Image: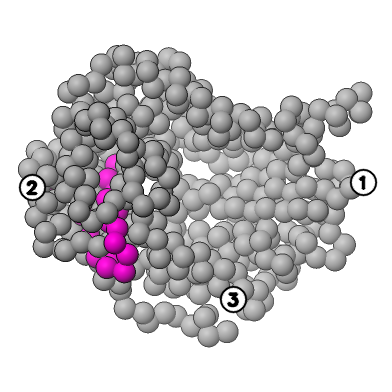
Amino acid sequence: MAIRAPSTDAKGAFQVKQLPNGVHVILAPDHRYPQVAVIARYYAGVRHEPPGKFGLAHLLEHVSFRPPRPEAITTINVAADSSHGQNASTHPDFTQYYHLEPPYRLRTALWEERWRLTAMPMRWSASDVEWERPIVRNEGRYRGETHPHHTSKLKMFEALFPATHPFRGLVDAAGRDLASLTFADVKQFFERWYVPSNTWIAVIGDFQEPAASAMIDAYFGSLAAAATPPVPALPDPTLHAETLIENVDPLAPRPLLMMAWHTPALFKPFDAEADLLAVMLGQARASRLRGEGTKAAWVHAQQMSTSAGSVFTLEAEPLEGVSLEELKQDIDARLVGFKAVPPADRDLDRATRALLRDTFERMEGTLSSGQALIDVAANVGDVDPVSLQRSRYTAVTGASMRKFIETYLRLDQRVVVFSRPVTMAKASQ
């Protein structure tokens, strides 16, 4: 159980700095592979959208993701595990654009990100928004609406968050307000949040640090400084009772029990406990939800961490002949048992090893390691992600896990969804 000991590992070979105009820069040379990743991240995500403008950050991502020249379209939207290409993504906390290229294209990638931030917006028009709107809508159909239990997840998040909270539609990839968003909305959101002090540029891979620094200074150091606006305050999502939801999902092949709780924000106290508990409940072979006498055929747990607060979800499929109500009673009893008998050190070790393995694997990838470096630097500081995660997870004890469950996974402060297939609903009529 040596892994439970605090880490003394030295910080990895990377540099974090800030340009005079506020642009944050991360340089992480790694000459093992002949590739370089460039990430441009703007802390302008779902949580920054004004009320009634859900989907705005995602729509802006699409409008911004245009090539600076026609021939560049050949490298766009290449899968991240390919030898080169570009892509972009929108998250609750941020939007990012990234390149995975051979080393000789580093200057081109940095120039294209400068172009995206300065020259591209001057060429935008309302037609760009109208062109991208149906594409964003179709993404929503593909990523959400065609998946089993999607309508149940929508109802769960609508119950978790008040009407004006931007996270209420997190699983609505299409965007509930997409049809009403205008070109003016897109432009104002860009001008407000895509400013130097809200920008992170990371370069990871096979490059020479002096040359890369000179390029970044040339392309981004010359941008005019602008203050980052304050992050909007969000309405309180605290639940004061248990909410039970019945839903018939048209695509559900089998019944599913869904539970959700509000939990601490990313890297805040008890966020690590939530990560470990998700592994112990839903992934570990020794999960108490999969033990002797369990009524669950399949279980999955997840801590969805964001800087504005997190959501802990638990999904379980009942064994043949077991009702969703019976499964709920069984899981509730086992959660109460966690408080009475918290996990032993060997169980914490097993979960810690699983999470650290994921961290190690993430740091092996050129692109994924850059994303991890920004995640930590932007939220915690100039810290090695591996050392940070090791210290967080090894600090968790049985007592702190019990405290987390008692405080946050209360049975009277959650949303529970009984998601049933159409055949089951018809049979009960």
Q: Residues within 10 Å of mark 1 (few under 14, many from 20)?
A: few
Quarter that holds the N terminus: bottom right
Q: Which residue is mark 2?
A: 218
378 falls in the magenta region: no
Q: Which contiguous range is marked in magenta?
A: 20-43
Residue 110's place in the image compared with 284, above or below, is: above
29 falls in the magenta region: yes
Quarter that holds the C terminus: top right
Horizontal placement of 87 versus 283: left or right?
Answer: left
Residue at the spot 82% in from the left edge and 48% down from the top edge? 318
Identify the image quadrant of residue 371.
bottom left
Dot 3 or dot 2, earlier in sequence: 2
Q: Nearer the viewer, mark 3 or mark 2?
A: 2
Identify the image quadrant of residue 325.
top right
The x and y percentages for residue 323 are 87, 43
Dot 3 or dot 1, earlier in sequence: 1
Residue at the spot 58% in from the left edge and 64% down from the top edge? 276
Dot 2 or dot 1, earlier in sequence: 2
Q: Nearer the viewer, residue 142 or 156?
A: 142
Q: Nearer the viewer, residue 142 or 20?
A: 142
Q: Which residue is mark 3?
A: 349
Q: Nearer the viewer, residue 159 or 169?
A: 169
Horizontal placement of 330 versus 281: left or right?
Answer: right
Q: Which residue is mark 1?
A: 321
Q: Residues within 10 Å of mark 3 (few under 14, many from 20)?
A: many
Identify the image quadrant of residue 126.
top left
Residue 154's place in the image compared with 98, above or below, is: above
Label 3 vs label 1: CA separation? 35 Å
Q: Secondary structure at mark 1?
A: loop
Label 3 vs label 2: CA separation? 47 Å
User: Do the residues bearing badges 3 and 1 touch, measured as CB atoms within 8 Å?
Assistant: no
Horizontal placement of 316 versus 85: left or right?
Answer: right
